[in-house]
Amino acid sequence: MPAALVTLEIARGAPVEVLRRVIGAAGAGADLPVDRIEDGLLLGELLARWAASADHVRVEVVGGERAIEVVVGPLSEEDHAGLVTALGLDADDSPTAAIVDEIRRDGTGGERRLRLAIWDGAVSNGGDRAGLPQTTDRHEQLPDQPWTDDRRPSSVSIRLPATAESLPVVRQALTGAAEDLGLATEVLDDVKIAVSEACNNAVVHAYPDGATGVIEVEIWTEPRRLLVEVRDWGVGMAPRSVDRVTGLGLGFSLMASLAEEVTLSRGGGEATVVRLGFATDAPPMTPNASAAGGRTD
Amino acid sequence: MSRSSSRGGVPPPFALSTETLNGVLVVHVSGELDLGHADRLAAALEAEPTGEEGGRRVAIDMHEVAFIDSTGVRALLQAKRRTEDAGGVLALVAPSAAVLRVLQLSELTDALNVIDAVDAEEMARLQGP
């Protein structure tokens, strides 16, 4: 299992800074040297800027031992062309070529993908490339839960393995969202704690020993509120909440005291859903409003 | 570029180290004391000698802990109980704002002896006669 394996779904108007943060966390998880992590953050920045003006973006980020791979798509021909231009891939002095080791274009028609890889220095200099993580392997590593149809407009969703290694990635995603939304540090700190507890619960209790599970975190805003839903497809919440041995009580009480709303429910595809609502003085989700072309939905 | 790449962008790395100062076992923890790292605390304490008769004095330096969750708090409580069961004393030194926030919400600030600095005399006082 790679150190990080994250799929992001970014709707128009969602906080795109999440993308940069998730790529940075994957690079750190892959133990890349600092300069390569910086390159990953720069790539995330270029992609985020493009994503802010795109309609709907799916990005997969894989961090392994010595590399990260970022796959954007599937894309329509038009979006693909826009991404190629945004990354300057057809230009002689492409900013992307300076920070990315490998660029591959896959697919045809409306199913185009762009794969971008950043390796550690030894690999870049001609070292052994065998065993580098590839997102093409992801379906063998993770059950592919269908995406729910009821995700909110202008939300960002991230899907990760239900493992302890995913938790720092989730917190980085929240930090990215907070940066885009202008959330106060105090609000972000509380959100990080409560969402971590919801994810802890899924990681520790949702999946029976040995099973590889998935958690999904969706982030969106409503007026004066930040909403986060944590979903898993494992054992339901009811049998979990009576598990006294592992002392879930502390995590639940933290969620209850930090969020103004905590709701447990059963969602589509038999998902267990923990919904957390936080009061915030930030305006409704309008990051990159200019890039989003003034849409008002 | 409108954004500077020098801004933060990666999770704070976890690190744990130990040293002995004036008879106090000091455990320095930095980064995120979360689900993925909480068991490192018990492992570090187990790896150290259990101390002289009367139990050892353990100070956990928490000033560089950027994040803690319930699993980290539980690890602290467990370490404290084990140390006290062996006749020793355990204190938290200079917890960061992130740690204090969680301790206060959990109403555990008093249960986990919080002190400002590694102070052998204060630890002896906490340990009692």
Image (cartoon, coloured by chain):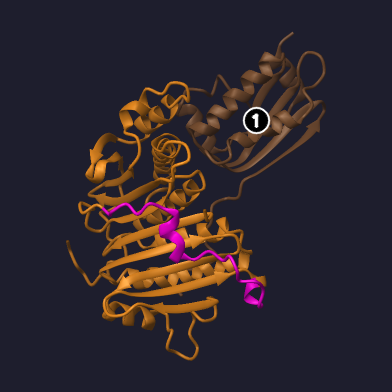
Is residue B117 visible in the rendered structure shown here? no
Question: Residue B123 versus residue A129: which sits nearer the camera?
Answer: A129
Image quadrant where residue A49 sits: bottom left
| Quadrant location of the C terminus of chain A in the rendered image | bottom left
Image quadrant where residue A84 sits: bottom left
Query: Secondary structure under badge 1?
Result: helix
Decide: is B120 above or below A70.
Answer: above
The percent position of residue A274, horizontal first and vertical second, equals 31, 38
Q: Mark 1 Cα within 10 Å, few/some/many (few <14, many 20+)?
A: some
Amino acid type, mark 1 = Ala
Is residue A120 visible in the rendered structure shown here? yes
The percent position of residue B116, horizontal first and vertical second, equals 65, 30
Q: Is residue B23 left or right of residue A184?
A: right
Chain ID, mark 1: B
**Helix, strand or loop for the magenta stretch, by majority:** loop
Instruction: Magenta stretch: give its range.
Output: A123-147
The percent position of residue B60, horizontal first and vertical second, equals 67, 31
Q: Is residue A3 left or right of residue A187?
A: right
Instruction: Count every numbered label the image shows and give the total.
Output: 1
Residue shown at the point (48%, 25%) measured from the top left: A246
The percent position of residue A199, horizontal first and vertical second, equals 41, 41
Q: Give the color of chain A as drawn.
A: orange
Question: Residue A295 versus residue A195: which sits nearer the camera?
Answer: A195
Residue shown at the point (39%, 59%) measured from the top left: A7
> What residue is disc 1 on?
B42
Question: Residue A78 versus residue A146: which sits nearer the camera?
Answer: A146
Q: Give the color of chain B as drawn.
A: brown
